[in-house]
Image: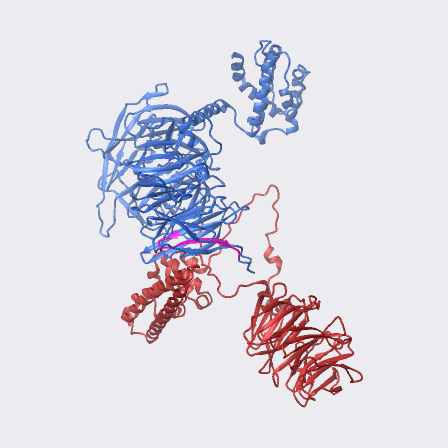
Amino acid sequence: MASYKATRIPSFPRLGEKVTQDTLYWRNYKTPVQIKEFGAVTKIDFSPLSPHNYAVTASTRIHIYGPYSQEPVKSFTRFKDTAYSGTFRSDGQLLVAGSEEALIRLFDVSGRVALREYTGHSKAVHFTDFSADRFHILSGSDDYTCRLWDIPSSAEVSRYSEHTDYVRCGTPSRLNPDVFITGSYDHTVKVFDSRKERSVMTMDHGQPVESVLLFPSEGLLVSAGGRYVKVWDMLKGGQVLVSLKNHHKTVTCLCMSSTGQRLLSGSLDRHVKVYSTTTYKVVHNFDYAASILSIALAPNDDSIIAGMTNGVLSVKHKKHPEDRKMVGGTSRHRPAYRVFVKGKNYMPKQDDFLVRKREKAHLKQYDKELKRFQVSKALDSVLKPHVRLKTPEVTVAVIQELNRRGTLKNALAGRDEKGLSILLSFLIRNVVDSRFAPILLTVAEMVLDIYMKVVGQSAVVDKQILKLQELVEKEIDYQQELMEVLGMMDTLFATMTAKKEAAALCLVHFSTNHCISKLSKKIQKGG
Amino acid sequence: MVASAEVRVARCGGSRINFIEPIITLDSRFLLCASGDAVHVYSTSTEERVHVLQGHVDLVTGLRLNSSNHLQVYSCSLDGTVKLWDFTDGILIKTYIVGHKIFSLYVSKFHEGTVFIILPMESSANTEAFQLVALHLPKTTGPEVEARDILSVLRDVSPIPKATSFGRGGEFVASASGLQLSVYFFRKQKTYRFSLKANDKKGARNRFTCVASHPNDDCIATGHEDGKIRLWRNFSQKKEYTYSTEHWHHSAVNALHFTPEGTELLSGGVESVLVLWRYGAGSKKDFVPRLGSAIEHISVSPDGSLYCTSHKDNKIVVMKSSRDISAIIQGLVKGETIRTDLLIDPRTKALVCNGKPGHLQFFSLRHDKQLYNLDIVQQEYIHEAGLHQCEVTKAAIDAQGSWLATVEERQENPEELDIILKLWAYDESTQSFHLNTSISMAHEGQISAMCFSGDAEATMLVTTGRDGHFKAWLLADHPDAQGEGASWSCDYVGSYHRREPTRCCFSADGSLLAVGFGEVVTVWSPSTWELLVTFSQPPGDIRDLCFGRLSCSKYLLGTTTKNLLCCWNLLTCSLEWSSTVDVILLQPDPLSENMAAFSRASGSTDLFVFKPSEPRPLFSQKAVCSGTVRRAVFAPREEVLEGCDESTQWLSCSRLYFLTEHMELMTFSTKSEEDQIIASSKQLVIDDSVAVTPFYLLLGKHRKSQRETQDSVSSHTAARIQLPQGSPAIRELLHTPAHVLPSASFLCNMFVNSLLISKSGVREDGRCREEEMGSEEEEEAEEQESEGEMEASVSAQGPAVQGFQTEPTPQLSKAQERELRKLQKADFSWLSSLLDS
């Protein structure tokens, strides 16, 4: 005696992106918190100290946010014009920022007024940072120079005017206090050593450089500009290692994950791409609502923060398993563990006579009805809202099973207005889905055959039938257009000797088209 | 028989076991069923075949237990004999020659020395008429007895065994034929006939299908074509009979049976549901659903503890009265048609073909036993006539047996065609195939051919479809986070001038693919998908294609529908030879260069076996079977057959099996092979006196070698062969069930002693006899003593034991000793016969 075989629900190949380990990792963030700033967010920098506050430079202010706060815990508002590049020192005590007024300001994080102001640049300062020895400030400006300042004396230590266009980005070396790198709109990235008069290395990016980033090992340098992200090998004297072209607008910012294995790039095309630093392939992609100007990752990748041109700061926090437990644990009281294992952990003794309880196979509601040959009830059970909306493939599989048993007509017949309108709404929703189309077209034909006589008695049903007709007609037009496109493609493919899959594709479309046009004729006849 | 009489077409296994109703022995340990012209005895608990009772020369048609001796069984056959067997030992006791075809056999407890059989009526010219007769069995001794004492009981009966039934206490016999029920009362010697109308009001079909009588009540149950069951009562009067009707079955009732106590009536039909009607409780009933296939016969063991149903798919299900299945005996499933090719599973060497609907069966040819069924369709089977079922139409296994490809098809109307291509991976841990990939609508039309490439590294599957394309499928790895492993995907779609591909074939090394498009053969390179060359021999479409093997791998053979067998040379790209034979089936031997070609010739089929490189066929046989051959396959042998001459050389490493039009599985066997089988069976007969246990095999070998050494030693002394005197003890040891034996340490001493060989044969012999005599006396003495007097018995033993100082007897408990001695006594005859020889 074989047991009842449950209805098989076919699994359809999932279209779209493949689920990889990376997608799972980068998807594990909560829905973003949106914070509105006063202007375009040009720089986000995390404090290296423990609560990991972050400074957001937007318009004429620098706000410091706590890791989970939505209101700034502190703000520096003494700028007369747009502020740029608010950056923490490596001890988290000081913050430096450039501004449109060609000044560099140094703040104490706990204070309010600027501790020092460094004057000397003649144009807006877009890039400021601290050197690795903490005693100097680097700056790059629109006056084509980059300078090194002494913090306590506010004196300019050295000046490099090798760039021939705006210097908009740069980064100090974390390992060597004398070395720093700048990128400029003259398409070059230059490496300077404060002990030397001139730059020690020059790399040609080919586009105005918007952002540079050093790898933690500092053997590799990443530069972004135009649509390109380029990786340079510093140890080979600045050879280009790889050139990535995955954005379709200018790449504005770069950022490295805490482990150094993933590289993130944000762009004006509103995407953030995640690259693997071993293969330099895009492993994940984030979409944002507006063009991205700045991006930062919290230590341990706890949150991703992106600043956009419309002044919105998007903060995504990582999901922690404890969070979910806290929510679930308080709301529901579950039975104790021993309730489940009761009687099941008994070890039989040697002379015990074992009576086995037959394993009862759990059947779904529709299978129970099908087992009893209750076809209408089986169909009803899969037309319940939660089934037909969430898992239409189950509904379709049961319909297919009924068709196989030759009892689909019986199951469809004898429905009242409400039942019929549910059925029609399901058809309207799914009939053009290519996965379900073959069987649902049969169903639609049957429904029209059965209920032809009662057309005109119910306004709701009539409306739905008209909607179905409209939908089918639209689909026919669409298919026709597709056929035209395929015809064009065929002429292209004909010149190539490569694989002929397109022909097969064409056939598929042709057959569905044929079915649909048949149905449409039927509806017109009925209506 | 042109070539030689050496090679013979033999029927091989897989005959129907559901032809007549099986019977269960009185102790419910064995189940007997007829299978072709033999009777098989199965164990009801282990499903193992215990004996095969061979002796009839035609189909066995009836099987009944001897009511006077429950260890004997009567069988009747179309060869006109009734045979009496001892089924526990598998011995033919007696043969009664009747001289007419016998269609059925009945035994009644109340008619000693008589069996009832159904014979064709001689008097009438009409061969369709049959009569039920009582056959008096003569008591004369001798293995073959003429039985001519025939007394006619009922005329015009149905030859179907289940349409006749003996009633309460053997008082009457009821038989149904067409629309008439006849009841004959033995005491009154009177027949009552009850007729039903052919068509009732509601379009009912009233023809009788089966009859069952209540064991201890005057009630007859009849089954009808429309699924009704009628219970007839009060039928001893012509006029006042009554019947009540029960209706559950939606189509004909195939079998009816009352339980021995008469509390339940069992019925079954196409629905494959066993219905248990409670007798005298109206229409109260229980069901045992989903038995797998239409029920043909039902039988119940004499003590009512086991029910047994035999099914249309050559299956017998034994279930306990608690409705738990206790055993399933499955033969080779043979439907009306076979859609798949015959395949050989490289791992188990089993034959793979269509089995139950939606399944593939793996049938071991060597053991004539079904290994397992693989559910391909994985859908609930609806037993309903006229329903379009999903069928497995194609199957292919790759050379290593690690991948199985199947195609299932369901076509309701020409427009709606469901095709699913499924690929199954062999799982080492569970030792079976698991679904890996399922591709729906792999082709837009039906799939006409399918084959795996022989390449071990990269297995490739090629399918050809009626949509004018052939597709190549490759195993591709998709590293997904969901942990799904490699699955199959389409690698290439090819076509040739919009023609329809019909056949495809890979060369042995997988470097070439030949696809037949209509009358054109195209040869492709699977690595680059380049069309290398085309061959064509119009007119006539390609029917079969295959590459030569081994030394003939440069040849490509093709057969066309217009009676042409062509052989192309792939090196010169030209036709090597062709001949005008109407080849319906071309089958290459995977282990040699040989090809088997079946050709049609006026109502029968001829076989040619040839090598592509040689012009003369190796072997040819006219008329291997009547009608056409449906499928054929070469199966590798377990061991290479030796001693083959030239004409049988082709059978040395593989066997050719084929399916005839009537779905019979046939094979070719050589004379030397048959001789070997006969010799081995003789050998088995000699050894039959001792139960073959692993222990015996171990010991037997040892003993044999011992005997040989003894032979050499004792030959010059001219003394008789001396067996170890302890052998009765060993025998006893081997025969006694393990649970009554004393502990092994206890027996060890005795056992070792028994193996010791004394030097002087004659004296030993005498002493042995003495010992046995002594022990007999002892036993008598012991029997006189009461059980309680243990000490006394030990003291009585004392002197006897002292007599054998050389071999200290182990201390056995009293019961054990008695048992041992009993056996020694029993083995006396054996010993004396040895002495005589």
**Can you say whether B54 is above or below A363 in the image?**
above
Q: Colour of chain B?
A: blue
Can residue B467 be seen in the rendering of this structure?
yes
Say which residue appears at 27% left-offset and 25% top-offset. Answer: B150
Residue B815 in picture, x, y percent from top left: 60, 25
Residue drawn at (46%, 56%), measured in percent from left and top? B491
Q: Nearer the viewer, residue B237 or A8?
A: A8
The colour applied to the residues of chain A in this rendering is: red
Q: Residue furthest bottom?
A: A80
Point out residue A65 in the picture as x, y percentages from the top left corner. 67, 80
Farthest residue to the right: give it. Answer: A153
User: Residue B684's spot in the image, x, y percent?
Assistant: 48, 25
Seen at 76% across and 74% down, the residue is A178
Q: Is residue A51 visible?
A: no
Majority secondary structure in the magenta region? strand
In this rendering, position of residue B694 left or right of residue B123: right
Q: Which image quadrant for residue A485?
A: bottom left
Q: Is residue B625 above or below residue B820?
A: below
Query: Which image quadrant is residue B554 in?
Result: top left
Front residue of B442 and B83: B442
The residue lying toward the viewer, choosing from A62 and B16, is: A62
- Which residue is at 55% across, 60% downward? B480
Q: Is residue A288 magenta?
A: no
The mark tally for this picture is: 0
The magenta stretch is B464-477
Does A474 sit above or below residue B229?
below
